[in-house]
Image (cartoon, rainbow, N blue to C red):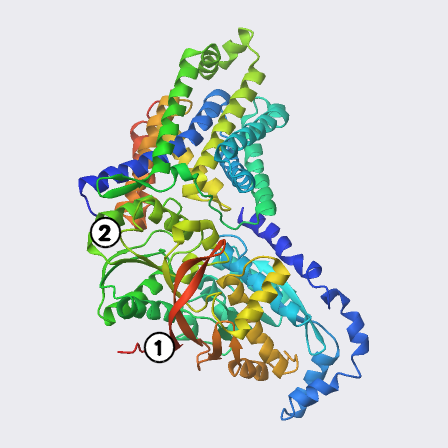
């Protein structure tokens, strides 16, 4: 049976946090888009997939991890920008058409990645500085996962400052609350949508490049991470960054402890708590009714 | 989604034969056909002298008409067994390249379909290949569940089928069929692995980690049975889902028990899970504490090992092949493979090659006549040849009898390879371990 000593529990918690931070990068973008535009972007996992593949290719050619991350983020943001500006924008306020279109993009991106990278799983090496373990007593922990937790916390802090303390952030919040009023105040809402979409997609790209050394890249990873990001979105409440942040921890930890203690039931341990939370609070932890 | 994935992958899989087969393309079939009638009786007469008259006539019709011999390649080029399927396809093509894409004078046409590792899709694609494309033989699929899914169909349709993987023991035991062959090691690999672990590596207590599906449980059971039979003890078994990605929770569970085990054994961990596991095992600092002992798929030169990189250095494994095996056939296989694909072959490429060449050897014996099924199946079951991984022959249930090698990963130049340190010959599916 699984061991329960304090050190393994601590490490399992760290595992959950590092997965949670990757999910947060993916879900924070998703929640901004959903909260503001009222649509669910089903292609969010595709930015993860494509950014991860491109990141690996950049890494293979240049050996520069930072460059790979930058290219991955820019790629995600560009894909999001193009998708929003030239496609979704045409169906302004037709939510169903927009969601279906993101669904279509999911398939298109899947096929593009299959055509280019052939579908064999790949997993990039982390930079030497972050490879190998740091030791907590006798027990080792990968320094790269510590790095991911750090990056995730920085992103969370940055997003919070951005949304709560800047004018642009205030506009986004206003848009989540009352989009019609916002337009009435003379804000160019279509441009706002496009920028937020690009921001969200860029964050997904970031999680793709950073996640690829531990999650790996393979056809289907887009759907796997999208599913977890949805759980985060639903548990946290649509449109709430704070909710996404907390829910990322909850989902990361549930996933991790579920796998550790009940490896054969690992899906169960995420979705049953999700169903319970929804039963008690249908809008999620921080969602608005 | 699956359908879309499948469709693209098929296109990819189906295009290469036309481009990668310069000598005798299937599309050039009409030309040899015109030249054939005069030559045709010769192979039929020389290769099947004892055959009764109708068979000879059929052989002439088959071999002489220049009608292409169609072989269905039923592998998964996407999904959890993408490595195995893609590699197997490469190996199959290599064999036909060596043979100029024909048996005697009969041109050979390969038709590939992607099963995506999904049993229902394997059956659908098998039916498509047999009924629509009229293939006369099948190679594949990879997954045990896929193999079981098509078993009854190929048996009833009398389509000779060779598996390179599909290790479910039923396929060559309870549900053995005259038409089904497995040309590479199956569960006897795990059996020999268990014996190696106890007797050659002197492990006393092991933690076993295997994927949570039929073949994973079978492999873990066989390992355990032979490991404990030789004096070892499995102290913990962990079954992550097939295609598990973040393996940290399992690794940490092992960390908590590290003091209780001499080895962590992976009898059946494949694909992206294998890569992530070996890397995480190193990243979590476990590699220096408890040795990792795996089956060959987890550390394969053609797929997983290059992705794992230095994290895999020094890892021990058991398998029925290694690129460093010093056998003439292995050298030829590797040289030809490098020349054709400009990359290093792995076990999956070798499995595809061996499966195809095993059928190819039988096809030569019957002069390319696939119409007489009984003679063909009889010829396949009697095939013996020196394969890249050792001498190949089938037992009476059509499972190859193999040599299992104990290997460990060394750095050679700029790449990592499995180097053989020990071996055990004549391992069949009912193997009795030396006491």
Mark pair 2, 1: CA separation? 33 Å
Tell which of B253 and B422 is nearer to you. B422
> Is residue B237 visible to us here?
yes
Q: Nearer the viewer, residue B409 or A199?
A: B409
Q: Nearer the viewer, mark 2 or mark 1?
A: 2
What chain letter is assigned to the residue under label 1? B
Q: Position of residue A256 (x, y in %)?
A: 31, 41
B142 sits to left or right of A276: right
Check disc 1: other Cα within 10 Å, few if <14, some if 14-19, many if 20+. few
Q: Label 2 neighbourhood size at 10 Å, few (<14), some (14-19), many (20+)?
A: some
- Residue placed under numbered mark 1 in the picture: B430
Residue at 78%, 75% in the rendered image: B33
In the rendered image, residue A32, in percent from the top left (x then y), is placed at 46, 23
Task: Give the SS element for disc 1.
Answer: loop
Task: Pick the quarter of the image with the C terminus of chain B.
Answer: bottom left
Element type at marker 2? helix
Q: Residue B257 vs residue B107: left or right?
A: left
Give the answer, above or below, for where A116 lies relative to B384: above
Residue A284 appears in the figure? no
Which residue is depicted at the point 20% across and 55% down? B260
Give the vertical position of A172 relative to B15 (above or below).
Answer: above
Q: Position of residue B389 (x, y in %)?
A: 48, 72
The disc placed on residue B258 is 2
Numbered circles on residues, count: 2
């Amino acid at each position: 049976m699984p061991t329960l000593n304090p050190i393994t529990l601590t490490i399992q918690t760290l595992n959950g946090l590092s997965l949670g931070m990757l999910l947060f990068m993916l879900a924070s973008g998703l929640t901004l888009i959903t909260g503001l535009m009222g649509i669910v972007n089903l292609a969010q996992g595709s930015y993860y997939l494509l950014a991860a593949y491109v990141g690996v290719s950049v890494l293979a050619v240049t050996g520069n991890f930072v460059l790979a991350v930058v290219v991955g983020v820019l790629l995600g943001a560009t894909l999001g920008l193009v998708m929003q500006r030239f496609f979704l924008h045409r169906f302004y306020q037709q939510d169903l058409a927009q969601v279906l279109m993101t669904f279509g993009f999911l398939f298109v991106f899947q096929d593009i990645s299959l055509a280019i990278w052939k579908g064999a799983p790949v997993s990039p090496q982390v930079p030497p500085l972050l490879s190998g373990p740091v030791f907590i007593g006798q027990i080792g922990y990968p320094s790269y996962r510590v790095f991911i937790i750090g990056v995730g916390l920085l992103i969370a802090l940055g997003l919070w400052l951005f949304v709560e303390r800047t004018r642009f952030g205030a506009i986004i919040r206003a848009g989540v609350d009352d989009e019609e009023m916002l337009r009435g105040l003379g804000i160019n809402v279509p441009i706002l949508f496009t920028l937020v979409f690009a921001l969200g997609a860029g964050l997904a790209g970031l999680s793709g490049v950073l996640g690829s050394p531990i999650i790996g890249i393979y056809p289907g990873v887009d759907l796997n991470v999208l599913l977890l990001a949805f759980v985060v979105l639903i548990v946290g409440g649509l449109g709430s960054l704070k909710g996404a942040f907390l829910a990322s921890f909850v989902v990361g930890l549930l996933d991790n402890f579920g796998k550790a203690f009940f490896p054969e039931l690992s899906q169960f341990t995420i979705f049953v708590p999700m169903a319970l939370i929804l039963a008690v609070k249908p809008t999620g932890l921080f969602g608005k009714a | 989604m699956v359908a879309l994935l499948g469709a693209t992958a098929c296109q990819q899989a189906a295009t290469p034969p036309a481009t990668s087969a310069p000598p005798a393309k299937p599309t050039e079939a009409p030309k040899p056909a015109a030249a054939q009638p005069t030559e045709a009786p010769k192979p039929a007469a020389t290769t099947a002298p004892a055959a009764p008259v109708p068979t000879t006539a059929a052989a002439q019709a088959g071999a002489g008409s220049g009608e292409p011999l169609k072989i269905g390649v039923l592998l998964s080029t996407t999904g959890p067994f993408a490595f195995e399927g893609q590699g197997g396809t490469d190996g199959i093509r290599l064999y036909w390249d060596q043979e100029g894409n024909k048996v005697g004078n009969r041109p050979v046409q390969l038709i590939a379909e992607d099963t995506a590792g999904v049993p229902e899709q394997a059956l659908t694609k098998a039916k498509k290949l047999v009924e629509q494309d009229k293939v006369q033989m099948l190679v594949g699929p990879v997954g045990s569940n896929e193999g079981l899914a098509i078993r009854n169909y190929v048996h009833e349709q009398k389509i000779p089928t060779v598996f390179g993987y599909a290790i479910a023991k039923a396929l060559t035991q309870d549900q053995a069929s005259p038409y089904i062959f497995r040309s590479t090691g199956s569960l006897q690999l795990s059996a020999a692995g268990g014996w190696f672990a106890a007797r050659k590596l002197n492990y006393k207590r092991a933690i076993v980690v295997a994927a949570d599906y039929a073949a994973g449980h079978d492999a873990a059971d066989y390992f355990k049975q032979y490991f404990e039979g030789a004096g070892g003890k499995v102290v913990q078994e962990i079954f992550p889902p097939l295609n598990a990605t973040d393996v940290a929770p399992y690794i940490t569970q092992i960390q908590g028990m590290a003091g209780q085990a001499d080895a962590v054994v992976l009898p059946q961990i494949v694909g992206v899970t294998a890569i992530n596991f070996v890397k995480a095992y190193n990243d979590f600092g476990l590699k220096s504490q408890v040795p990792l002992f795996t089956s060959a798929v987890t550390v394969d030169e053609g797929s997983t090992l290059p992705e794992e990189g230095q994290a895999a250095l020094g890892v021990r494994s058991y398998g029925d092949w290694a690129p460093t095996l010093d056998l003439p056939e292995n050298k030829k296989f590797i040289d030809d493979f490098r020349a054709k694909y400009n990359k290093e072959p792995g076990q999956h490429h070798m499995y595809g090659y061996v499966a195809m060449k095993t059928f190819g050897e039988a096809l030569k014996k019957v002069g390319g006549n696939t119409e007489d099924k009984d003679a063909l199946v009889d010829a396949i079951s009697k095939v013996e040849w020196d394969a890249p991984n050792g001498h190949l022959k089938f037992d009476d249930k059509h499972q190859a009898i193999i040599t299992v090698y104990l290997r460990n990963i060394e750095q050679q130049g700029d790449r990592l390879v499995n180097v053989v340190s020990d071996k055990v010959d004549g391992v069949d599916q009912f193997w009795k371990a030396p006491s």
